[in-house]
Amino acid sequence: MKIYDSVGGRVGLLLSSLVFSVTCSCSDPEPSPGGNGNSDQFETTPEQFPVAAGVIDEASGMAASASMPGYLWTIQDSGQPNSLYLISKDGKSIKQYNVPGSNNHDWEEVAVGPGPDNGVSYVYIADIGNNNQPVTSTNTIYRIPEIIGIDGSFNQNALQKITFSYPDGARDAEALIVDPVTKDIFVLSKEMQNTNIYRLAYPQSANDVTVAEKIGTVPGVALATAGSISKDGGEIVVRTYLAVYYWKRSTGETVGQTLVKSANKTLIVALEPQGEAICFENENKGFYTLSEKGNAASVSLNFYKRK
């Protein structure tokens, strides 16, 4: 995908060795009275785990596996296979799984969360990008039960296709969040201004085209490339090429009500060649980021430990 500056021109790829510090234009609000009670402090220098080049050079989304502790799911965007990749948290093991019955127009995000069957963990694959092509009138989110062992395979008969359109015209998007509390799906558009929030309420139809509900906009966030919500639903992060924004969700608050407020804080993270993936660690010990390789020789899986 292209990276744009504030006036829409293409800029060069960023060097992963640099560190970028961002401060909110607004003062940090007091911690939310609800949420999960976890600290909102994270290490600013990540643990880095090298990822061998040549397998997942176009990583565009990431989610922690619920059924296989110690592993993360990632995907690649358009032009790459319609596959999920299981990567170990030390970056040393990568295994590819075809998702039969799916098509990779421009996969931009992956999430793990609940779904129609109680007690079953589902993988959500968001085919919501445009890869610099004319945006499509509808978009697809694939939902399929997560395999329960590294030797498993995905069952085409269990694949569901959630097809939706936007209420205000076609959009490019790269960030998706599945609320573990309500099972609602939220899509964040990728735009220079007014990052829009769209909701697909549970239960989502796997037969008809659903018109997403526009909830509002995310203040101060432009060019959102990924999002993640903690397993308990109490914390949300949204990343761009340059920053990671963090929210604590108050008790009784919806994801949409959280995201229309300014982020609690902007986290200090290392710059990556083309950062398009983020996810919370399954036990809320921190969060991971991953980048497309771009023009770099290779990338690392980065872990930011909670303090």
Image (spheres, grey):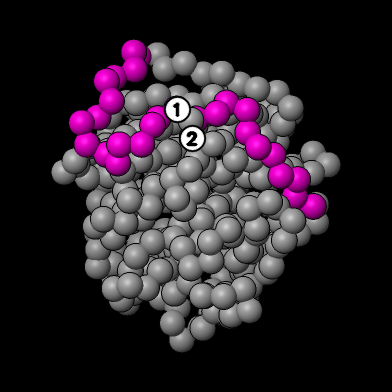
Q: Nearer the viewer, residue 146 or 186?
A: 146
Q: Position of residue 55 (x, y in %)?
A: 76, 59
Q: Position of residue 299 (x, y in %)?
A: 74, 43
Q: Nearer the viewer, residue 257 or 101?
A: 257
User: Which of the 4 image quadrants contains residue 256?
Assistant: top left
Crowding at dot 2, Cα within 10 Å, few <14 / some 14-19 / many 20+, comes out as some
At x 24% / y 63%, what residue is drawn?
A: 202
Position of 13 relative to 69 (above/below): above
Which residue in the protein does label 2 denote? 306
User: Which of the 4 image quadrants contains residue 211?
Assistant: bottom left
Farthest residue to the bottom: give it.
157
Q: Position of residue 137 (x, y in %)?
A: 42, 58
**Magenta range:** 26-52
At x 31% / y 48%, what residue is drawn?
A: 233
Q: Position of residue 212 (x, y in %)?
A: 29, 55
Camera sees residue 145: yes
Q: Is residue 41 magenta?
A: yes
Q: In terms of sequence position, does the residue under pointer 2 or pointer 1 come before the other?
A: 1
Would you say the magenta stretch is mainly helix, strand or loop? Answer: loop
The residue type indicated by label 1 comes to Gln
Q: Quadrant of the N terminus?
A: top right
At x 22% / y 45%, what residue is drawn?
A: 254
Camera sees residue 217: no
Which residue in the protein does label 1 denote? 41
